[in-house]
Image (cartoon, helix red, strand yellow):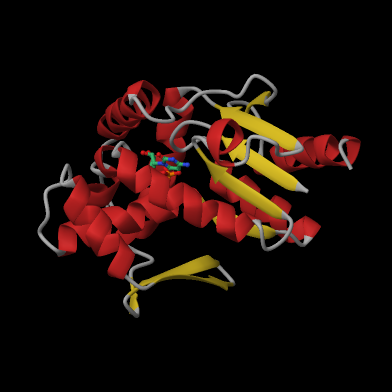
Amino acid sequence: MQIAIDGPASSGKSTVAKIVATKLGFIYVDTGAMYRVATVLTQKLGLDYSDEQGILAALKQADIQFKPDQAGQKVFLDNEDITLMIRTPEITNNVSQVSALAGVRTEMVARQRKIAAQGQVVMDGRDIGTTVLPTAEVKIFMVASAQERAKRRYAENTAKGIMTPLATLQAEIELRDQKDSTRVVSPLKKADDAIEIDTTQLTINEVVEAILVIVKQNM
Ligand code: C5P
């Protein structure tokens, strides 16, 4: 079984997808983290965020590893732990430019399908239901108001000591949504057969339970 969870920035996809995968014993794949690694690599090499050929060449040589741990997963680039680095504002605010490059997407989608071929998966992202796993048995499209998503990101950031004002976070989230929804290749879009869940008024547990009910109906 394949479960695709898509939706805009900070809609709670990763948190929920991780719990659903653990409860079902499925592999969890955070595809946003993969595009974030490509963005870190671009920055480290001093490449331009629009340098498609340069980024692709670097990606093909890079050793990228995701290792499950208690807090979710650790991310390594050429044996360096970049788990925290992929979530910094610099990377978050530039990832949409790197993920819009057609060649980068082709490379990432191939890697994502390879992982999915290894077993039952819960995969979260923007184009999983539409492009990466179009035949997934369960497709969820998670949404929440931009205000609520900014509030959640603010709470997360504060816990990590990042002090970006709430209004700035909301503006950044809206800009990223706009870039992700209007790009030419595989834009953020609800698949025709996806079930939409608005999480604005729901707790994490309520969303998890709603998805597990849908999964059982499709088993
Ligand atoms: O999910 P997350 O916010 O970590 O994703 C970071 C960025 O990666 C998104 O804003 C989007 O630009 C890109 N992305 C994508 N396709 C996916 C997952 C993420 O383009 N399947």
Asked whether residue 110 is in view, the answer is yes
| Side of 210 where 116 appears, left or right | left
The image shows residue 47, relative to residue 84, as above or below, that is above
Q: Quadrant of the C terminus?
A: top right
From the viewer's perspective, is residue 68 above or below residue 162? below
Image spot of residue 103 (x, y percent):
32, 44
Task: Determine the residue positioned at 28% across, 32% down.
Answer: 172
**Residue 60: % across, % down:** 32, 64
Query: Seen in the image, is 94 located left or right of residue 102?
Result: left
Q: Where is residue 29 drawn, in percent x and y?
A: 57, 55
Q: Picture coordinates of residue 210 (x, y %)?
A: 78, 35
- Count of marks, rendered view: 0
**Residue occupying image coordinates x 34% and y 80%:** 79
Residue plotted at (31% across, 76% down): 78
The residue closer to the viewer here, 62 or 217, is 62
The quadrant where ligand 1 appears is top left
Comparing 44 with 211, the one in front is 44
The residue positioned 11% from the left and 48% from the top of the image is 48
Residue 115 lies in quadrant: bottom right
Q: Is residue 199 visible?
A: no
